[in-house]
Amino acid sequence: MIGTAAAGIVGASILVTSFISGVFGMAGGLILLGILLVFLDVAPAMVLFGIIQLGANGWRATLWWRLVDWNIVARYLIGAGAAFLIMRFVVAFVPDKAVVYLMLGSIVFAADLLPKSLAPDITRRWAPPIAGLIVMTLQLLAGAAGHILDLFFQKSLLDRRVIVATKAVCQTFGHVARIAYFGTFAAAWDDTIPLWQYASAIALALIGTSIAAKVLLSMTNEGFRRWSRWIVVGISIVYLIRGVWLLATGN
């Protein structure tokens, strides 16, 4: 069971990160997973994270349902489904914390090295299934890849509300897959965490997401893209430092 002080930190983190994700459609999950990994081992952290994010993304998808680009979603799920099957029945392993942090921190900078001709744009013909394949693989290896999915959307000219709505549906599927993947490992379910803590976590995620919807309406598309980029870069740097520290100290 997470202690009282730790539960307070996690609860506040869920509320704040759900608000961030509700505005930008990403970044909140990236922050939350890093915090959960401080208090839990990788497998139970992934399961709890998946449950929380399933509630947040599912509610966000409901709030913006009419703006979802279902053509993108359908093609995205083809790639994501293929990646899940490969990861579950061929790869099937749980990485350690240092690897998770290093992958979370390095992916964005690796994407920046791609030539402009290969720059990800979710509106390109083959981009959705490729995005699904890459993002699902990284979600099951590194735990969170919403910021990578964001790269595909940030390069497009889609309206910010369409971006948030469509990503929410894609990510909802991703969190279901995460729970199904990590939930099959013996160490995934922490019996010391009572059901009421799971329920409270979901409730906080829904509250943060609902508040964010009003903020998103007041933003411009330019401001949305600019802030999204800086938030992801900042978080990535922190996680790279954390990963290197874990490798160097073993703590």
Image (tube, rainbow, N blue to C red):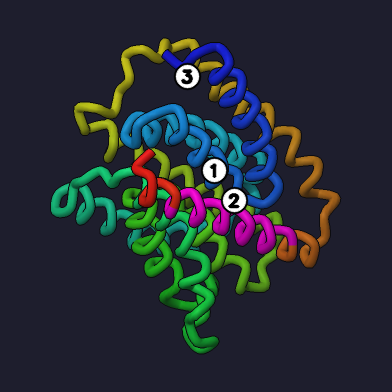
Dot 3 or dot 1: first in sequence order is 1
> Circle 1: is it few (<14), some (14-19), or many (20+) Cα within 10 Å?
many
Q: Quadrant of the C terminus?
A: top left
Q: Are marks 3 and 1 in contact (CB under 8 Å)?
A: no
Query: Label 3: how many residues lie within 10 Å, few (<14), some (14-19) or many (20+)?
Result: some
Q: Nearer the viewer, residue 132 or 192?
A: 192
Residue range in magenta is 227-244
Question: What's the CA distance linking mark 1 and mark 2?
Answer: 7 Å
Q: Determine the CA span between mark 2 and mark 3.
A: 21 Å
C-alpha separation, residue under disc 3 versus residue under disc 1: 16 Å
**Which residue corresponds to the image point at 63% horizontal and 45% vertical from the top-left?**
21
Which mark identifies residue 29?
A: 1
Which secondary structure is most common in the magenta stretch? helix
Looking at this rendering, what residue extends furthest in the right direction? Answer: 218
Q: Position of residue 102 (x, y in %)?
A: 42, 56
Under mark 1, the amino acid is Gly
Q: Nearer the viewer, residue 207 or 59?
A: 207
Give the residue type at disc 2: Met
Front-lying residue, 180 or 4: 4
The answer to the question of whether label 1 and label 2 lie on touching residues, with beta carbons closer than 8 A, is: yes
Judge whether residue 236 is colored magenta: yes
| Residue 26, disc | 2
Spot occupied by residue 148 in the image (x, y as percentages of width and height) = 50, 61
Asked whether 239 or 140 is in front, the reply is: 239
Q: Position of residue 159 (x, y in %)?
A: 71, 63
Mark number, residue 198: 3
Q: Quick one: SS at disc 2?
A: loop
- Whether 221 is drawn above or below 12: the answer is below
